[in-house]
Amino acid sequence: MNNFSSSIIKTIDGTVTVTLSNGAIYSLENCSDELYNNIVKCRFDYDKLERLLNPKLDENRKEVEDFNNLIDKVNNSNYITKLGDCFYIKSISNISVPIELVKSFLEAEINNSQELIESYLNFWRLCSMNPNSEARANLFWFLKKWGMKISKNGFIVAFRNAVVKHKNIHYELAEFISESFLNIRFTKKKSTKDYVIVKDNEDNYFLFKNTSKELENKKFKVLGTVQELYNKLSNENEEELVFTDQHSGTTTIKLGQPVRLNRKECDESQISCSRGLHAGGLHWLGQGYFGDVTLMVLINPSQIVSVPKEDDYGKLRCCEYYPVSIVSRDGKGNIIIPDFEDSFDDDFLNITLENYGINNNDIEKQTINIPKLIELEERDIIRNLEYMKDKIKSKIIK
């Protein structure tokens, strides 16, 4: 809207002071002749003059509008509250929630995406158990930036390259087993016990439901259910297929078995390349980059030790991850992205709780080794673990 009341323009020793008709005052030091002439030309047009004096005016107004809209959404949220300048999910912890997660959470509430809401709640429960405040603050931002997904239990999906260290199985079969496991469990959301893998006379592999009439064909040899074959790959006492990191060649990596490093041995600083178990988004991985095999891994947010924010490298460090599957590549070497969405089902959190010494009979006796946090009381940790453990019991695929 134009305002034709003249603005007051004064010049003293190269400093131009402009008083707008609404009383706002702008002072410009070392004002150029060009800018001064434009100010004079616009002195009767309030809108143009204000934008000339404050080039970021529209941007600032948009920020204020967006923030006010955010507060309105928070006021209508069933989970998020605002105290002072921070946002919290009080049902989980007294740790302030990063703004990126707040925005995504509120969007899920508006869309009534119950599975996504559950995914974000579990993600923040696990984040709240992480003693590294920088990792907590940066992690969701990192996931959004690199397009990484979160499981319903709150785990993050990441990738890393590796090399084969030892195998007693045809690699093509191992790849087929892990791909079938991933597809059935995470995409189809079915039981891997209900599907079998067969081999024909030409050593081609096929996946059938265990009730399929195709199994009557004599050219097929049944190798086992997908669950049985996957368990054999991941059995810690067998050497069917073992990977390692190309950098040191000392890490034992097996599908379905957690890979761990003592947190004290990890560098929790913001340095991009340092001590720790490395993983990241697909952007980070190039063909042959520190290994010719790409693995999909699940990471518990509480085990993240570093999320560097000052670079575009696209990887993070953790002290524990779970290799889930071999990820295939096409004929050009491009990674074939697994087909599943945020909040997909997984039951690996059950493994996590068991490995941390959670007592399955009496949660009060849990022995999870989490450093004391000022913001998170021990009773909150126990309550959160108890909640997640009960949810897992109700969802594990039989």
Image (spheres, rainbow, N blue to C red):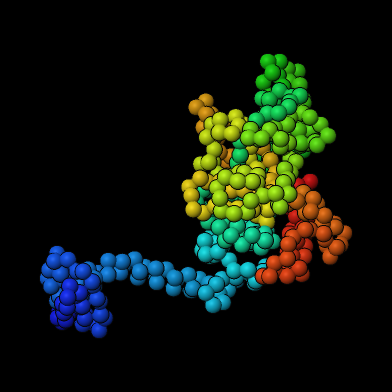
Residue at point 55%, 75% (across, down): 82
Q: Is residue 83 visible?
A: yes
Is residue 285 shown left or right of residue 352? left
Instruction: Give residue 207's position: percent from left, percent from top.
Output: 69, 30
Q: Is residue 66 above or below residue 132?
A: below
Instruction: Give residue 276's position: percent from left, percent from top.
Output: 65, 46
Toward the right, the furthest residue is: 361
Residue at point 61%, 44% (across, down): 279
Q: Nearer the viewer, residue 136 or 145?
A: 136
Residue at point 71%, 15% (across, down): 201
Is residue 59 shown left or right of residue 106? left
Instruction: Give residue 141's position: percent from left, percent from top.
Output: 53, 56
Quarter of the picture containing the N terminus is: bottom left
Toward the top, the furthest residue is: 201
Q: Is residue 214 visible?
A: no
Residue at point 79%, 58% (across, down): 368
Q: Is residue 385 above or below residue 79?
A: above
